Image (cartoon, grey):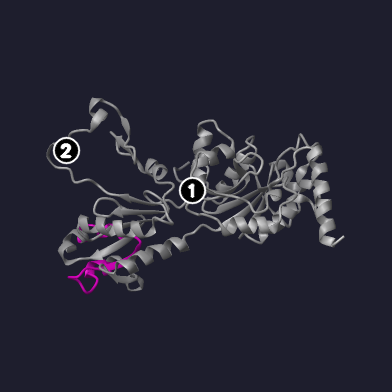
Amino acid sequence: MTLKEHKKHSTIKRPGYGSFGRQEWAILGAPCDTIKALADTVISSLAAVHKCAYVDTRHAEGDAAVNLPGRLAAGAALAYTDEIHYGQFNYKVQPNPFQYRQLFNEADLVLVNGNHHQAKAQVVVIDAVKKESLRKRVAQLTNVQLFLMAGNADEVFDFVREAVPEWQQVPVLRLADTAEICAFFGERLLQAKPVLNGLVLAGGKSTRMGQDKGAMAWHGKEQRYFAADLLQEQCREVFISCRPEQQAELNGSYKTIPDTFTGLGPYGAILSAFREQPEAAWLVVACDLPMLHSETLRFLVQHRNAAANATTFESPQDGFPEPLITIWEPKSYLTLLAFLAQGYTCPRKVLLNSDISLLQSPYPQALLNVNTPEDAERVKQLLGQKNVLADGN
């Protein structure tokens, strides 16, 4: 057997990370002060809507280049300081790419000083002063998305043209055109907004109810299909989450995602969906919400905050986030896995300890869930009253 024939590990879909995050640009070809000033301008323009981050290397001189700060000098591997208005971590060992992605997971935009670090996309400044410096970094030009012309340059350097085969299709702006540059990044982030899929949680065993809650027909069809049809109005694709042994029983006209994180209830179902499509956001609804209607889902989608880990409703019963009618953004995948690694499998606990957008539902009755026969009787009465009012009687 050759090495090529041997596949030791399973292949799963990976999120589209670069060196630090999903949407990252290295700015190179200019002095570091120019890159920092441009990054400040872009971040200031976008920070009200998007979470922005910046990566650079400090130019330490003399003793500062060799002396470790604070407790690191005493032998600590990691030190955290609460600076009241911000927090500061100091690491003795530089993080590796996997750790960087964890640290920058929640950032919607990562700007990188390309004079010191690489990123999966590049913004190239054409500056005569830094021409030779840029020539040394030409191998980094793997995905150039914007050229910025400094005041001393009028055309793209020959060696850059050779390194970027389709350089003529790359947008060109003047370095001084900061409004247009900010608009460029804003448009790219808008284009990168994750698509929204729907997931109906129907894999529970309904022990307290005594019958399959997903199969209960509150509106003339089984609730799992009714909920899936509602999600079709708001989502690109809709799936029914189920246990593997349930899959053959379900209507073949509906797509399914069997649990691959087993024994974890709804938590495992959400993770299984992210494992299937890690770049999508997931609008997750439980199959035990018989009062759910289109208006509630439409309100949730219209008020979606893609910069947060999740967008959800405040429960009218206890005031806590309602995890089973929630839009989970792709960045929450890593967060869910991190909580699982610490022994937690409660979606609500993740929401309580994450940056989320919490909404007041204009239709609180739609969040009423049914877990017992007593709950079912109450909902039957409510639905009967609703139908009477709808009929005008």
Q: Give the image location of residue 303, x and y in percent.
A: 56, 57
Q: Position of residue 9 (x, y in %)?
A: 50, 40
Front residue of 306/270: it is: 306
Determine which residue is flagged by label 1: 331
Q: Which residue is drawn at the image coordinates 54% and 41% (left, top)?
A: 351
Q: Residue furthest top?
A: 74
- In the image, what residue type sits under mark 1? Lys
In the rendered picture of this protein, how many numbered marks are placed on residues? 2
Res. 90 image quadrant: top left
Q: Quadrant of residue 362?
A: bottom right
Q: Which residue is mark 2?
A: 64
Q: Is residue 38 visible?
A: yes
Residue 145 in magenta stretch:
yes
Q: Is residue 93 above or below residue 255?
A: above
Q: Above or below — where is 89 with respect to 227?
A: above
Where residue 136 appears, x then y in whole percent? 20, 57
Residue 35 position, x and y percent, is 25, 57
Q: CA distance from mark 1 to mark 2?
A: 36 Å
Disc 1 element: helix
Up/down of 134 relative to 61, above or below: below
What residue type is disc 2 on?
Ala
What is the magenta range?
A: 135-162
Query: From this viewpoint, which residue is outermost toward the front?
Result: 393
Q: Is residue 233 left or right of residue 153?
A: right
Question: At numbered mark 2, what does the secondary structure look like: helix, strand or loop?
Answer: helix
Q: Nearer the viewer, residue 335 or 20?
A: 335
Q: Quadrant of residue 129?
A: bottom left
Asked if one can make out residue 7 in the rendered structure from this viewpoint, the answer is no
Q: Residues within 10 Å of mark 1 (few under 14, many from 20)?
A: many
Q: Is residue 153 left or right of residue 186?
A: left
